[in-house]
Image: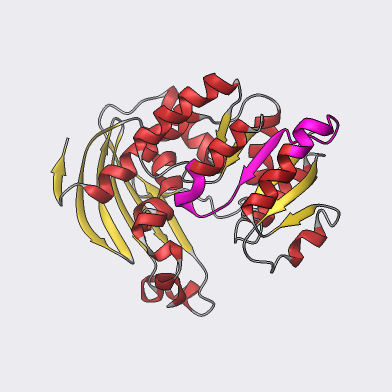
Amino acid sequence: MSNFALIGAAGFVAPRHMKAIKETGHSLVAALDPSDSIGIIDSYFPGSDFFTEFERFDRHIEKLRREKSDSRVDYVSIASPNYLHDAHIRFALRVGADAICEKPLVLNPWNIDALRALESEFNRRVYTILQLRLHPAIRALRDRIAAAPPASPLEVELTQVSPRGRWYAYSWKGQEAKSGGIITNIGIHFFDMLLWIFGPAAGFEIVERMPDRAAGLLHLRHANVRWTLSLRFQDLPASCAAGGKAFRRLTVGGKAIEFEAGFADLHTACYAEILAGRGFGLDEALPSVDLAYRLRTEKMGVRS
């Protein structure tokens, strides 16, 4: 059984990490978050130590590393704000643990080069959560494209509406320097999915880039993709609008790919792959990190 520590334990996605650790048969020995509203941990690991200050958490993890070989931390799971991922990954490697980091792994592509050097220095690994690669419908689509590559690029449309209230703009998620903006914070999984299925980007066009909405065209090896990301409630279709439920749609050649179901267990699947030595690492994360960085920083218009 492996020991885990969790950074960002009070965040939105943290329960999925707790669930994955428990369902794969391992133990959470320490958790960190500046917020102490973390009662959800009782559903998974009520015996875990908990810290609201990084310095005390750091001291505890180091103590376990030096004094208790049976309790030392093997993995640090990271669900902290995006701009802190890089620093928290470095912490994990320094204390002799592998890092399992939420999306986006980092905000800037050059950060991955530095992490690659640290992996080698500390002889540890950095993994990221790219759960859409494990979704059965997405895997089936990729296999179909790989088995019979289209003679000309397919016409693909991707729409993701994740409605958010006014609070969003006042949180770290609404600050591009901290979250990477809507293109990175909301779009990174979908850009990774598209690159994984349809091949590398040959060019792109940004047609809209607002804090709460972005849209454009990606020219990939096997597809031309029209994509839209939105945080606006008014962009929801009527079927979702009443409850403010997120909406996503992927069509290939005008045919919908159904991948709404099955999201709940994908973090557990990612953890199982990591623990089996097959997790997604720095090389897998780089293409989408680089594309998202370019989409949010380059001038509007066509790029190649």
Closer to the camera, 142 or 171? 171
Q: Residue at x 14, y 44 (%)?
A: 302
Quadrant housing residue 123:
top right
Q: Locate the C terminus by quadrant.
A: top left
Residue 75 seen from this side = yes
Q: Position of residue 130 (x, y in %)?
A: 53, 40
Instruction: Work out whether 22 lies above or below 2.
Output: below
The residue at 44%/40% (across/down) is: 193
Q: Can residue 134 be spotted in the picture? A: no
Q: Residue at x 42, y 54 (%)?
A: 185
**Magenta span includes 157:** no
- Residue 35 quadrant: bottom right
Q: Is residue 245 left or right of residue 76?
A: left
> Front-most of 4 and 49?
49
Position of residue 30 measured from the top left corner of the image (x, y, whole percent) = 75, 48
Q: Which residues are magenta?
A: 63-86
Which of the 4 image quarters holds residue 33?
bottom right
Residue nearest the viewer, comparing 29 with 157: 29
220 displayed left or right of 234: left
Give the image location of residue 72, x and y in percent.
78, 34
Label total for image: 0
Q: Quadrant of the N terminus?
A: top right
Residue 81 sits inside the magenta stretch? yes
Q: Residue at x 15, y 52 (%)?
A: 300
Q: Is residue 73 above or below residue 5?
A: above
